Image (cartoon, rainbow, N blue to C red):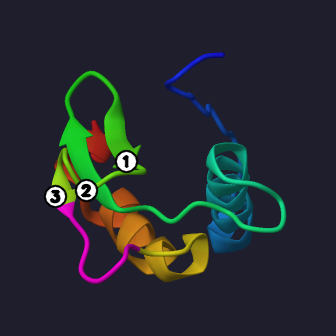
């Protein structure tokens, strides 16, 4: 089984982005119990990298975030990041 999943998604709007995040969380967890995003970082080679553990990257508060909870942060990054605008 592959450890690192990559999603290349073409779409528009927050709803489609939310569905991609939900798919990533389900792939790591299960349909009944999706994994939470525990930390993140920005990589010049890969863009926004999400982690299912809090040992790498920038740790999220508490026990992590669901796809819906993480969506506003990711949406803001996509719309304001200089790396994304290039």
31 or 67, which is in the foreground?
A: 31
Badge 1 element:
strand
Q: Which mark is residue 51?
A: 1
Q: What residue is drawn where x is 39% and y is 48%?
A: 50
Badge 2 element:
loop
Q: What stretch is highlighted in magenta?
A: 59-64
Q: Distance between the residues labelled 1 and 2?
A: 7 Å
Quarter of the rendering occupied by the C terminus? top left
Q: Residue 58 carries which label?
A: 3
Residue 68: quarter of image: bottom right
Q: What residue is drawn where x is 38% and y is 73%?
A: 64
Q: Decide whether the magenta segment is chiefly helix, strand or loop.
A: loop
Q: Which mark is residue 15?
A: none
Badge 3 element:
strand
Give x and y (percent) for residue 8: 62, 31
Give x and y (percent) for residue 52: 42, 51
Quarter of the rendering occupied by the N terminus? top right
Q: What residue is drawn where x is 44% and y is 79%?
A: 72
**Mark 1 in CB contact with mark 2 (< 8 angstroms):** yes
Closest to the camera, between mark 1 and mark 2, is 2
Q: In this view, does 80 lie to the left or right of 63?
A: left
Q: How far apart are marks 1 and 3 (CA)?
A: 9 Å
Residues packed near mark 3 inside 10 Å, few (<14), some (14 to 19) or many (20 plus): some
Give x and y (percent) for residue 2: 60, 17
Q: What residue is drawn where x is 61% and y is 34%?
A: 7
**Mark 3 in CB contact with mark 2 (< 8 angstroms):** no
What residue would you read off at disc 2? 54
84 or 74, which is in the foreground?
A: 74
């Amino acid at each position: 089984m592959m450890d690192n999943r990559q999603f290349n998604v073409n779409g528009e709007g927050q709803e489609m982005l939310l569905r991609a995040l939900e798919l990533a969380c389900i792939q790591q967890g299960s349909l009944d119990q999706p994994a939470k995003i525990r930390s993140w970082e920005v990589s010049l080679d890969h863009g926004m990298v999400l982690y299912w553990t809090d040992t790498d990257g920038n740790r999220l508060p508490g026990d992590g975030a669901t796809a819906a909870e993480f969506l506003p942060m990711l949406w803001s990054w996509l719309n304001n990041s200089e790396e994304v605008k290039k």
